[in-house]
Image: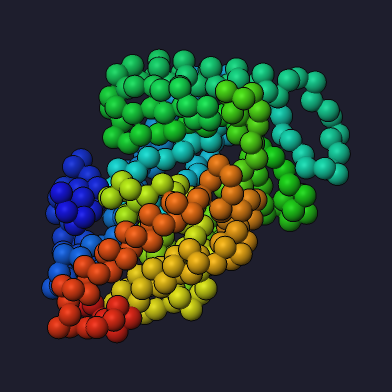
Amino acid sequence: MSLLDKLEARRIDPSIEEAKLLNEAYKRIQQSDSVKYVIGAMQPIDPEYTKNTYIQGERICNQLKSRLEDNCEYEYQGSVTNDTHIKAKSDIDVLVLTGKFVTLESPQEVSSPYKGNPIQDLVDLRKDCVSSLENAFPQAEVDSSGSKSIAIEGGSLTRKVDVVPSNWFNTNKYAETKNKIYRAVQILDSKKLERLKNTPFLHNAWIEHKDSETNGGLRKAARLMKSLKYDTETIDLSSYDIVSIAFNMNNSLLNFPNKQELSIFSSCLAYCKTLQSNINLRESLNVPDEHRKIFTEGHATLQGLNQLTYELEKLSNDVLQENFRSFKKLEEARVEY
């Protein structure tokens, strides 16, 4: 299958009328397939498809609410929540936050110390989630082999949903502002029996802020590079780290008017090449919420960056060769759609 064929296949939701495909930008482009791919990959997934993803998430939440004894709260995280998802049938993460305790960041003091065992409570919550999902969706497949999430898909569900047992972690910034974006969570690692801090709402807030400053350019760059990862199956970088690379690009590299998306594509390639050659810059980059470096042990590697850069350059060559009569440089091109 060509890249364009793969793009179309993953942007279709067979459960919704195929007439929705008429709204896809690449269908209206009178250009080569490589240009159609670049422009199509940058666009958001049809809102109707995304709405259906949330509906499936709500089904999971409603069943857990009716079955779990713990007074849990439920939140979403992941690419669907920040609009960098690239599949019509994207999966979604449901955070199941225990109602038994909340962790406070030092030096906050607890007025009524919790006498239970937080790890054991989350282990028990995880077991209860598994049994509840199996009982609520007997035709679906419930996979609890992952250390952090419980995956459920199939049966009557039209999306894969990852259920993530966790607890609230109130940061000092959240205590000061009461702004939810600063509220963190701790996710259970059931294999290591430890809790991992995560700030999904702050991550999303930074994505939204940067995207608004770049006329939608950040999300377009992120979706394009994530699309190449998915469609080529050759890029060993996580989607999270790819979005983080895009986030670190200077606003001037992302801020272009609509129909000049090939300039964003050119910027992605140029920036990845810069990261390849500049080790100090590469190793200085943080993920959006700054809780870790992008290129650090267990996460993004130079090899993965090389793979991404190679695929970007290969696609760039295809675009230029197929359109040599129309333009000589990507940044000179204007694509009508």
Specify whether 157 is left or right of 25.
right
Q: Is residue 69 above or below residue 183?
A: above
Instruction: Work out whether residue 71 can be spotted.
Output: no
Q: In the rendered view, does 150 fall on the left or right side of 6?
A: right
Q: In this view, does 221 lie to the left or right of 241?
A: left
On the image, the x and y values in percent for residue 72 come to: 59, 29
Q: Quick one: 162 or 5, which is closer to the camera?
A: 5
Q: As displayed, is residue 219 above or below residue 324?
A: above
State which quarter of the image contains the C terminus.
Answer: bottom left
x, y percentage for residue 330?
30, 78
Q: Residue at x 61, y 64 (%)?
A: 280
Question: Could you tell me how many numbered marks the image carries?
Answer: 0
Q: How is the image coloured?
A: rainbow
Q: Which residue is drawn at 60% across and 59% down?
A: 283
Horizontal relation, residue 34 to residue 255: left or right: left
Could you tell me which residue is drawn at 65 percent across and 32 percent down? 195
- In this rendering, the answer to whether 275 lies above or below 238 is below
Name which residue lies at 38% across and 57% down.
Answer: 308
State the image coordinates of residue 254 (x, y, percent, origin top left).
44, 73
**Can residue 194 be seen in the rendering of this structure?**
yes
Q: Which of 291 and 268 is in front in this view?
A: 268
Question: Image height check: is 129 above or below 43?
Answer: above
